[in-house]
Amino acid sequence: MKISILSLFPSMFDGILNESIIKRAIEKQKIEIEIINFRAYSPLNNNQVDDTPYGGGAGMVLRCEPIFNALDAIKTKDSHIILMCPTGKLFKQTKAKELTSKKHLIIICGHYEGFDERIKTLADEIISIGDYILTGGEIPAMVVIDSVVRLLDGVINETSLKNESFDNNLLDYPVYTKPAEYKGLKVPEVLLSGNHKKINKYREEERLRITKEKRSDLIN
């Protein structure tokens, strides 16, 4: 898979691309990620990418031309274009899994007051990561990238992907490690029993209990 990110602030991605799982995925050539500063595609002499909104109002709005020009230069028949925007559909684990089938993701990060509405006509889909406002689309794009890349074949151990939170609309079960007791807090006896049938039953019951308590909307 290849991921192209359109952003006015490419250096914001330095951390996520040079640490942990995503760094290793790049080194293993499981994923190719490029960051494109779409300011370079502005037709204006000063590389301006925003302007005041028609009809008045606060803030600055991203102009059409830089985004249209950038996409004309990089998109192919295999490209799937995502616009990060609060008006989009809420991002979920099922969407992350769906996106792993794409050969080329292009993620557009907005900034300032918002996009010229015509930019939305370029997107195959519009995605939001939650009901709140951030200063730009870079952090939401990182969320999408991280959640998708970890699901690609060979990026992390397949066993680690089993029974994760949101699989079958359930949250994950609680996990423990050594020591078996710390400051009076004990690991459940069943996990120390060695009886894997009982352990699996306990974990499934805990997934259901926790989901009912914390996120009953998932079950409903």
Image (cartoon, rainbow, N blue to C red):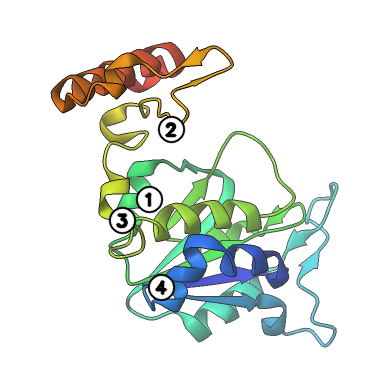
Task: Answer few, some or many: residues within 10 Å of disc 1's Cα (few below 14, many 20 plus, some between 14 and 19).
Answer: some
- Between disc 2 and disc 1, the foreground one is 2
Q: Quadrant of the C terminus?
A: top left
Q: Looking at the picture, which amino acid does disc 1 mark?
A: Ala
Q: Looking at the picture, which amino acid does disc 4 mark?
A: Ile
Mark 2 or 1 closer to N-term? 1
Tell me, for residue 177, which label it has, or none. 2
- Between disc 4 and disc 1, the foreground one is 4
Query: What is the x, y in percent for residue 216?
Result: 39, 15
Mark 3 or 1 closer to N-term? 1
Q: Looking at the picture, which amino acid does disc 3 mark?
A: Asn
- Of 213 and 47, nearer the camera is 213
Mark 4 or 1 closer to N-term? 4
Instruction: State the count of labels.
Output: 4
Q: Which residue is mark 1?
A: 96
Q: Which residue is mark 3?
A: 157
Task: Answer few, some or many: residues within 10 Å of disc 2's Cα (few below 14, many 20 plus, some between 14 and 19).
Answer: few
3D distance between C-alphas at marks 4 and 3:
16 Å
Q: Is residue 8 visible?
A: no
Quick one: SS at disc 4?
loop
Tell me, for residue 31, which label it has, or none. 4
Q: Quadrant of residue 15?
A: bottom right
Q: Is residue 56 visible?
A: yes
**Seen in the image, is 53 located left or right of residue 78?**
right
- Between disc 4 and disc 3, the foreground one is 3
Q: Is residue 67 above or below residue 170?
A: below
